[in-house]
Amino acid sequence: MSFKGILSKMYFNPGNRDSGPAEYMEEEVTKIDEADVEVVLENEEAINKKFSGANSLSKYAELGKIMVGMLKDIKNKVYPHVPWFTIATIVLVLLYVLNPFDIIPDFVPGIGFIDDMSVMAVGVGWIETDLHKYLDWKIKEGKGL
């Protein structure tokens, strides 16, 4: 099932799995498709709102904005030559963050965002080089951050 299907049901049930979060994410990132990219871009406002909440960390809010900006530039063919794995990882991370009913539901006081930030940290670790290249390109082109 794609993340679009998961999002439409508004729950995330990773099921019984023996692997850890990184292995699970690695498996799920291969399932991302063009429709999932559209879901993220259509929900940019909701993603930004979630990042701006009192329980989030400003570092992750900025990373989220950079990732959404990168997706937009890729979709608009302004920033080409990005590996599909990078695009899929960004979509997976942002859809996970957008989903309020994930491993630890976001409405749980104090700890609801821990899993979101963990997924984001793992995803950013995978694509850190591509994010740096994108930011360097933005600066070189004079497009600002």
Image (tube, grey):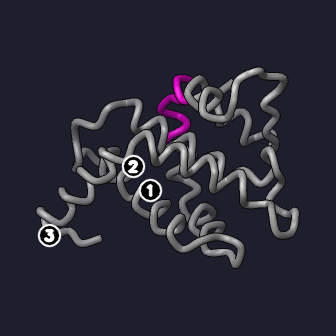
In this picture, is 105 found above or below 38?
below
Residue 53 figure quarter? bottom right
Q: CA distance from mark 2 to mark 3?
A: 18 Å
Q: Indicate the amino acid at tag 1.
A: Val
- Magenta residue check for 108: no
Quarter holding the N terminus? top right
Left or right of 64, for residue 98:
right
Q: Position of residue 50 (x, y in %)?
A: 66, 66
**Magenta stretch bounds:** 29-37
Question: Regarding mark 2 in the picture, which secondary structure is present there?
Answer: helix
Mark 3 neighbour density, 10 Å: few (under 14) some (14–19) many (20 or more): few
Could you tell me which residue is drawn at 39 percent across and 37 percent down?
Answer: 86
Question: Regarding mark 1 in the picture, which secondary structure is present there?
Answer: helix
Q: Position of residue 41 (x, y in %)?
A: 50, 52
Could you tell me which residue is drawn at 81 percent across and 39 percent down?
Answer: 9
Q: Earlier in the sequence, mark 1 or mark 3?
A: 1
Mark 2 neighbour density, 10 Å: few (under 14) some (14–19) many (20 or more): many
Left or right of 64, for residue 109:
right
**In the current view of this chain or complex, which residue is farthest to the right?**
108
72 vs 130, nearest the viewer:
130
Q: Position of residue 111 (x, y in %)?
A: 80, 62
Asked whether disc 2 touches disc 1, contact meaning CB atoms under 8 Å apart, the reply is yes
Residue 71 is labelled as 2
Q: Which residue is mark 3?
A: 142
Q: Which residue is mark 1?
A: 68
